[in-house]
Each structure stands twice: as C-alpha cells, then as structure tokens.
Amino acid sequence: MTTNNDTQGAYRIGAVARLTGISPDTLRIWERRYEVVEPLRTPKGGRLYSQQDVTRLTMIKTLVDQGYAISTVAGLPAEELSRRLNSAQPANLPPPGSGRHEVCVVGQAISVRVCSTERLPEGIELAGAYTDLEAFLEDETECDTLIIELPFLDRSIARDLGKPQLRARARRVIVTYAFSPSNIVSQLQRSGLQMLRAPVALDHLWQQCLLSHPRQHDWRPPEWNPRVANDEPVPPKRFSHAQLVQLSEVTTSLECECPHHMANVIEQLAAFEEYSARCEVSSRQDAALHGYLNQMTARARWLMEVALEKLAEVEGITVKPAEGKSSRQN
C-alpha cells in the first residue's frame, strides 16, 4: 500500500512506534509482508513517515487490537478502515458481556514491563504477574492465557512446563525463550504450547492473546521424515480424565460395555501420547520418530473420542462438564 509522503513533519520509526503503539520490529514486518505503508528513506536508509502514515497505522493497529487479522486490513483504504472502526462489533472477540481475556505473566522482566504499562489493550485484563513458575503455581489464579518468559530451555524446564497443574490453570500457554535446542522446542510444541523466540514485543503478545486462530487441521496420517522433527499441532483433547471415568461407568441399552472399553482405550492412547512427547531423544532422527509417534497417537486418540461422543449422543448420555470448567469440553 503506497501512500503520499512528504518530508515536512516526517517521523522516524522510533517516534512512530511511540505514537501508534506498534513496535519497530512489528512495523518492519507489516511493511515487508503487507505493505501497510511505504515510508520515504533518508540518504542513510532510515525510514521517514508522514502524518498520513501515522494516522493510517494508528487505525490499523486499533483494528488489529480489536481482533482483525493484519492480513485482512493492511490493504484497505482509509474510508473502509474508518467504517470498521465505527462498527459496533469487533472481530474475533467475545460478544459484549462475556467477560475480558484474563492473562497471567511469568518472568522477572515481563512482569516488570507489564506492571509498568499505563494502559493495557482493550479486552485484556492482567490476572496476575509472577517472577517465576513456582510463584505462579503457589497461587490459585486461573486465566485464559498464561505467558511465560524464559531466557533458555532445557530438559528440566521442559518437564516443569509439562506439569498438569500448570496446564489446568490456563486454557492456553505461550512461552517466549531466547535459546533452546530445537528438539526441546518441538517437544513443547507437540504438547500444545505456543513457542515464540525472543525478543517479543508486548504488543505482539497482546495480539496473540486476543486474536482467535480458527484453523482446520487435516488429521490424516502424516508422512514421516527422519530428518525433520515435525512440530505440527495435534488434535485437542475432547474429554477430561473425570469425564472418561464417568463414561466408563454408565450403563447403556447396548448389550456390551462399549463406553467402558472405549474410555479405557482413549486413556491408554492419551498416556502414550504424553509419553512420546516427553520421551528422551538423542538424535535428530530420534526426535523425528518420536514426533511422528506422538502425532499418530494423538490422531488415534482424537478419532476414538469422536466415536465416543457419537455413542454418548445416540445413547442419550449426558457428560458432566470438567470440574472447575464451563460446559465446554477440554
């Protein structure tokens, strides 16, 4: 998207970042990938933005904060940006009255940065800030998104991030890290954590919290590449342990114990799925193999859960919500 620039009253990238709330790194990415604006250049290559650019970027940033994907608004003319800003319902955010998106942050640096922020984006509510994981686990706060900032990752930290009590406290976990072996990053991604390489601007983290990412996955068996530790996401679990126990104990009109057997099979598949995600690896091929096993087991578990849901529907079995959760399934 090309704009008419003039050097009079031009802003450098640092000033634009302060005025719009878009970090310089994010601004460069938006320009390179989406051509949101086309600033002039100084003789030494520095960017110069006009007031028109700043206004446009501010409008786009506001829409992104409301839930619009940057790819959908980057090329829109100013009139359409204004119309969307004046519309009643932001995109991809919960409807009015459904509550705010509660976020907890863990880490010495990020807790200071967040607590010193004068104003959080609309829709974000800081539920807690902790210097380390132990402090978070000692508390009883639950949140929609847990952001964990770590300087590095190793096997010990990976085990801590895999603790069930950690995942039970947050619907989504985002981990930022500076250094890590690739196999550990892949392992944590397979277990459902979102991994972001530092440095990560706060604006980007808030966008990750607010934006929904509906994505249709093809759960057909993937091909195994012995040279690549595949980090594609696995199907989410449709039943909690307590729900599977309930289903295994019900009596149906069928002259068999299908709910009991199916629940047991799902439990076993889930156990091996977790085991394969955490299994120690000694080489790239070993990591690729365990990633493949994890994905295949997850798909098998997901298919059995879908079948069990159909059985419960046909038999009129009501599944109780998971303890401490709403009626949606985990």
Image (cartoon, helix red, strand yellow):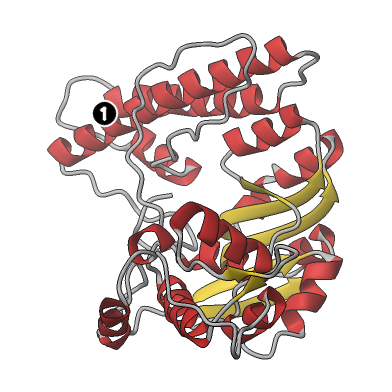
**Taking 242 as reference, is 128 above or below it?**
below
Q: Secondary structure at mark 1?
A: helix
Q: Residue at x 26, y 37 (%)?
A: 309
Q: Residue at x 52, y 87 (%)?
A: 51
Q: Position of residue 76 (x, y in %)?
A: 31, 69
Residue corresponding to mark 1? 307
**Taking 42 as reference, is 193 above or below it?**
above
Q: Position of residue 314 (x, y in %)?
A: 13, 36
Judging depth in this view, the residue of 210 and 295 nearest the camera is 210
Q: Residue at x 77, y 21 (%)?
A: 280
Picture quadrant of residue 157: top right
Judging depth in this view, the residue of 320 and 289 nearest the camera is 289
Is residue 55 in view? yes
**Split into 4 quadrants, where in the image is the N terminus?**
bottom left
Q: Position of residue 115 (x, y in %)?
A: 75, 82
Is residue 142 in view? no
Q: How many marks?
A: 1
**Given the image, on which type of amino acid does mark 1 rest?**
Ala
Q: Position of residue 284 (x, y in %)?
A: 73, 15
Left or right: where 153 falls relative to 148: right
Question: Label 1 neighbourhood size at 10 Å, few (<14), some (14-19), many (20+)?
Answer: few
**Taking 52 as reference, is 173 above or below it?**
above
Left or right: where 171 falls relative to 276: left
Left or right: where 330 falls relative to 27: left
Picture quadrant of residue 136: bottom right
